[in-house]
Each structure stands twice: as C-alpha cells, then as structure tokens.
Image (tube, rainbow, N blue to C red):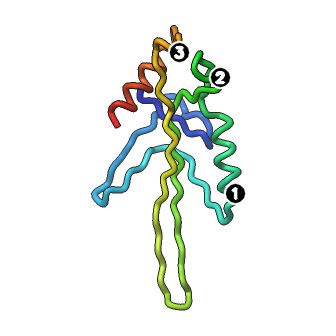
C-alpha cells in the first residue's frame, strides 16, 4: 500500500503519480511534491499545522485519533555568511511514523484492518 500524498498541495492530475528518485549524490526526492520557501519558524509551524490537518487519521479500539500514515516533512536549509563569502546547505527530515497496533486489541475490520496490516508491515521493514 505504497501511496504518496502531498499534504501541502492539490491532488495529482489524472494519469500522474508520485515517484521516489535517488540521484548519484544520495539525494532522495519525490516527484510532484509542493516546495515552499520560508524565512521564519512561524511559517514552518504554519506549514506543519496545515499538513497535520489533512493527514489521514481514524479511530480504533486502541486510539481515538490513530494516524493511519507515515509523515515526512523535509526542510532544506540554506545559509550564507556574506562577510567571508561562505554558503552552506543541509536537509532536515522530520519523520512521524504511524504507530503499530495489535490486531487482537484494535478489533480492526475492513479498510482499518488492511491499513493496520500495511502499517505494521512497513514498520517491520524498517
């Protein structure tokens, strides 16, 4: 159940899908994801809050607001020191993994059962 969803953007046009790409320098990108330039921590928090409001959650017997997906927030950081002419950049990945639930305790059925099995399978792969 490898489905990618851009929590900051619009739905993909028909016929398009996200793909994960790795370049020779080890950089990983996902196609068709929204990039936003920010210059303050307030803007970063606004984007995180927006993403969290559209993240997939559902009630189970284990948790009333169980996240049904993993969440990755990539922050590309660029900085410069004009006095010495130096520039630096880096990437910070914030990852929130959906929690695993025991099927015997969650009493999940139907779509929730499939989600729980896929979440547990992906966590086991890590």
**Image point 38% across, 42% down: which residue?**
20
**In front: label 3 or label 1:** 3
Asked whether the residues under the numbered discs 3 and 1 touch, taking CB atoms below 8 Å apart as contact, a structural biologist would say no
Disc 3 to disc 2: CB gap under 8 Å:
no
| Secondary structure type for disc 2 | loop
Q: Is residue 49 above or below residue 60?
A: below
SS assignment at label 3: helix
**Label number found at residue 15:** none
The foreground one among 15 and 75 is 75
Label 1: how many Cα within 10 Å (few below 14, some 14–19, many 20+): few
Where does residue 5 sit, x and y in percent of width and height? 53, 35
Q: Earlier in the sequence, mark 2 or mark 1?
A: 1
**Residue at position x 32%, y 56% from top?**
26
Q: Is residue 25 left or right of residue 85?
A: left
Give the image location of residue 41, x and y in percent. 67, 61
- Horizontal and vertical percent position of residue 54: 65, 34
Which mark identifies residue 106?
3
In whole angstroms, how far apart are the C-alphas of marks 3 and 2?
11 Å
Residue receiving disc 1: 43
- Whether residues under marks 2 and 1 lie with C-beta atoms below 8 angstroms apart, the answer is no
Considering every residue shown, the one lying at the far bottom of the view is 83
Left or right of 83 in this view: 117? left
Q: Residue at x 38, y 30 (%)?
A: 122
Is residue 2 shown above or below 62? below
The answer for how far apart the CA atoms under marks 3 and 1 are is 37 Å
Front position among marks 2 and 1:
2
The disc at residue 64 is 2
Label 2 to label 1: alpha-carbon separation: 29 Å
């Amino acid at each position: 159940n490898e489905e990618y969803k851009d929590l900051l953007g619009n739905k993909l046009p028909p016929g398009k899908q996200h793909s994960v790409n790795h370049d020779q320098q080890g950089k990983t990108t996902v196609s068709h994801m929204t990039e936003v330039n920010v210059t303050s921590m307030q803007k970063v928090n606004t984007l995180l809050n927006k993403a969290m409001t559209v993240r997939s959650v559902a009630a189970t017997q284990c948790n009333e607001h169980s996240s049904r997906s993993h969440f990755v927030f990539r922050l590309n950081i660029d900085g410069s020191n004009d006095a010495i002419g130096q520039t630096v950049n880096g990437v910070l990945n914030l990852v929130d993994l959906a929690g695993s639930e025991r099927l015997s305790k969650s009493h999940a059925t139907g779509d929730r059962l499939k989600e729980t099995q896929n979440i547990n399978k992906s966590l086991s792969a890590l």
